[in-house]
Image: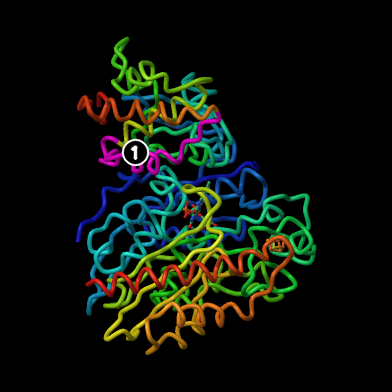
Amino acid sequence: MRPVSYSRATDVATAIGAVSADPQSAFLAGGTTQVDLLRIYVEQPRRLVDINDLPLNRIEELPGGGLRLGGLARMSDVAEEPELVRRYPMVAEALLLGASPQLRNMATIAGNLMQRVRCSYFRDVAAGCNKRAPGTGCSALDGINRGHAVLGTSDCCIATHPSDLGVALVALDAVVQTESPAGQRSIPIDDFFLLPGQTPEREHPLTHGELVTGIDLPPTPVAATSRYIKIRDRESYEFALASVAVAMSVADGRITEIRLALGGVATKPWRARQAERLLDGAPATTESFTRAAEAELAPAVPHGMNAFKIELARRTMVRALESMAQREGTT
Amino acid sequence: MKSYRALRTAPSPDHAVVRGPGEVEVHLQVNGESRRTTIEPRVSLLDALRDRLELTGTKKGCNQGACGACTVWVDGRPVLSCLTLAITCENREVTTIEGLSDGDTLHPMQQAFLDCDAFQCGYCTPGQIMSAVALLAEGHAGDDTEIREWMSGNICRCAAYPHIRAAVRRVRDEGGRGDASR
Ligand SMILES: Cc1cc2nc3c(=O)[nH]c(=O)nc-3n(C[C@H](O)[C@H](O)[C@H](O)COP(=O)(O)OP(=O)(O)OC[C@H]3O[C@@H](n4cnc5c(N)ncnc54)[C@H](O)[C@@H]3O)c2cc1C
Ligand code: SF4
């Protein structure tokens, strides 16, 4: 780990000012990504600006029934917020199925969206990696790529986006609130996560020193009947091989509203719009679910070791939808 | 709506200054004692505890947040000291395994780990105990499934898991409180 200097900001303007003025500086929140990547030389800022004292850890009501989650709220605190659990259970479940209790006590939800990929070549400074060192090639294309993505990939990068929270947020059309010296802006979550394309080093539209101050969850009544299912190599404390966030309502056997997103299989948290279109108004049957899942995965591209993920994602989607239909059928 | 008890609170104005990258004086509150040490800002809480403050109960396993051996409490909540920079803990209360016992009297969870044979090599044990005490205090020890899930951040290479769960159950059933002696 290279030497770093340190300061602690107690107000937003100071934090933003410090980081935007120095290209070699970075925000330090929970540190669970930042310190890890500093230690293995993947991130090399020479100055850290500690933002843990900024007053951004509250959860507040938005007019019309939404919630604003402060960017510095910890994963563990957000997961336990009773109003979030009641109105957006899939967000709480996605948080609780992520990382470990210790990490969730440290990690902030803004940091969660900003976390870097877990690709082993990205984490190995001796390996070629277009994301870490643009133009050096992608070692994963012909390498160990069992955990890599099948949707949203390019010939430059196939790394899976690791966030669970992000998957629930894209299903909800959440809005990321930011602040920089240029002012405040609201970024729809769909525009926040970028596909790798030819520029995998760009993962989000933030400028250097732009701070994520909060995440808005719009009022979404259907989200009260929602869940997050995560399939992984072990039962706990592991990233997803495939995951599904689903919110669904059913009336007279037909789907009246549907929100569906995938994790573990795509280069960004993946809103399953194709499947949603097919499911909207369709009978809530396994047949519809299978057809929709297959349509969503039709463009999937396997890369050697990760071919199994296409079938796994299909089954996970069908299982998630079936479990929602059963729940809806009995209430 | 409720505003959360921050994991990190109480800003102190003089911290706005830039410190390091060389060694700087850092003031820590560990197990109820004020400690002062001179370290670079890049030093982890884990290394500061072990190499500077001679509190070697906390163990270094993977050093990348994956194993839980380095678990300590900051402001009463279990965190990983390997991914925490020591300098970020100024004005926080740090508790390590050494802070659990009351002199020679072990914390009930420490005693239960001995009685239930809840370790073999013992390397992960301090971290296991710091998580186990917190899990009871937070009410996550309802049944074995819940204990397993909430202890999953602590890996045991000897796989003493059934005995670890037995130790947690014993303290739970004897009504031993989780919140240490603080
Ligand atoms: C062993 C392990 C297992 C994990 N498992 C999972 C899992 O199963 N699911 C999952 O979703 N995640 C998982 N994670 C990732 C974890 O959730 C993230 O590391 C964490 O959420 C990052 O938040 P942080 O506050 O620690 O960010 P930091 O590490 O402090 O920062 C991360 C990055 O974001 C930037 N940043 C931080 N806050 C802001 C802000 N407010 N505005 C702008 N930029 C900011 C920092 O500069 C840095 O570049 C795991 C991590 C580890 C180490
Ligand atoms: S998949 Fe992406 S992150 Fe991994 S080596 Fe290729 S370019 Fe780098």
The quadrant of the rendering that contains the C terminus of chain A is bottom left
Q: Quadrant of the N terminus of chain A?
A: top right
Q: Amino acid at mark 1?
A: Asp
Residue B30 image offset from top left, x and y in percent = 37, 27
What is the x, y in percent for residue A129? 74, 60
* Image position, residue A91 (x, y; %): 36, 64
Q: Is residue B172 left or right of residue B95?
A: left
Residue B149 is covered by the magenta coloring: yes
Please provide the residue range marked out in magenta: B136-157
Q: Is residue A25 above or below residue A101?
A: below
| Mark 1 neighbour class, 10 Å CA radius: few under 14, some 14 to 19, many 20 or more | some
Q: Which residue is mark 1?
A: B144
- Between residues B145 and B40, which one lies in front from this camera angle? B145
Q: Is B126 situated above or below A284?
A: above
Let me know if residue B91 appears in the view: no
Rendering colour mode: rainbow
- Tell whether circle 1 marks a residue whose Cβ is less than 8 angstroms from ligand 1: no
- Which of these two is toward me, A129 or A133? A129
Q: Quadrant of residue A80?
A: bottom left
Q: Residue at x 31, y 15 (%)?
A: B106
* Secondary structure state at the residue bearing disc 1: helix
- The residue lying toward the viewer, choosing from A233 and A40, is A233
Q: Please, which chain is the residue tagged with disc 1 on?
A: B
Count of labels shown?
1
